Image (cartoon, rainbow, N blue to C red):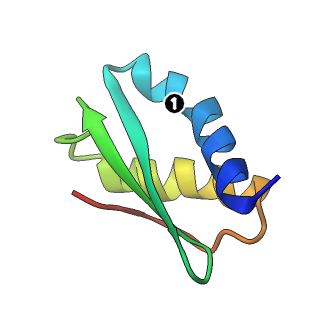
Amino acid sequence: MALVDKVKAKLNEIRPRLQSDGGDLEFVSLEDGGKVQVKLTGSCAGCPMATMTIKQSVELELRDAIPEITEVVQVF
């Protein structure tokens, strides 16, 4: 399985938790060096806790499951 497919599959496992709070996330890209770009949507897009959600939830889970991932960043 290609790295981008692994990332998308893991993000799909994470999405239901965000959706249960009225939000969601979209995969944008996988950059060189293992940097994943995502876009938060719904209630997550304007949430003051969005950065914490990205860094302390999404990034930790992706890095734990896929060691090649170095960072997850939000794009607008």
Left or right placement of residue 21 versus residue 68 in this view? left
Q: Tell me which corner region of the image, top left, top right, bottom left or bottom right, holds residue 69.
A: bottom right
Q: Residue furthest front?
A: 2
Q: Position of residue 72 (x, y in %)?
A: 49, 64
Q: Residue at x 46, y 62 (%)?
A: 29
Q: Residue at x 16, y 41 (%)?
A: 46
Q: Position of residue 35 (x, y in %)?
A: 53, 73
- Secondary structure, mark 1, is helix
Q: Position of residue 16 (x, y in %)?
A: 53, 22
In the rendered image, the vertical position of residue 60 relative to residue 16, given as above or below: below
Left or right placement of residue 3 versus residue 16 in this view? right
Q: Residue at x 30, y 46 (%)?
A: 49
Q: Tell me which corner region of the image, top left, top right, bottom left or bottom right, holds residue 75.
A: bottom left
- Circle 1 packing at 10 Å, graded few (<14), some (14-19), many (20+), is some
- Residue tagged by mark 1? 15
Q: Residue furthest top?
A: 20
Left or right placement of residue 14 versus residue 48 in this view? right
Dot 1 amino acid type: Arg
